[in-house]
Image (spheres, helix red, strand yellow):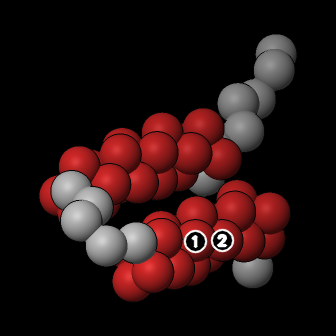
Amino acid sequence: MKYPWTALSLIIIWIATTYIVVKTAGLNVNYILLVTLTGTVIISLIGFRSPTLRK
């Protein structure tokens, strides 16, 4: 795997989100999943981009 820390952080975010959704009653699940999805996209764009070549 080329980017293990980025992938690991995404896995932890989604496991934590799953735990929160399952354990908390009366939660707006759509809002929580939207925040998690947004965070995933931002971390993916930052963490998985290819390195730039310097000239």
For image coordinates 60% across by 38% down, the residue present is 46
- Label 1 crowding class (10 Å Cα cut-off): few <14, some 14-19, many 20+? few
| Identity, as a three-letter code, of the amino acid under mark 1 | Ala
Q: Is residue 45 left or right of residue 35?
A: right
Quadrant, the C terminus: top right
Work out whether residue 41 can be spotted: no
Compute the Cα span from label 1 to label 2: 6 Å
Name the outermost residue toward the top: 55
Q: Is residue 10 above or below residue 49?
A: below
Quadrant, the N terminus: bottom right
| Identity, as a three-letter code, of the amino acid under mark 2 | Ile
Residue 2 picture quarter: bottom right
Residue occupied by mark 1: 16
Q: Name the element at disc 1.
A: helix
Q: Nearer the viewer, residue 5 or 48?
A: 5
Q: Are marks 1 and 2 in contact (CB under 8 Å)?
A: yes
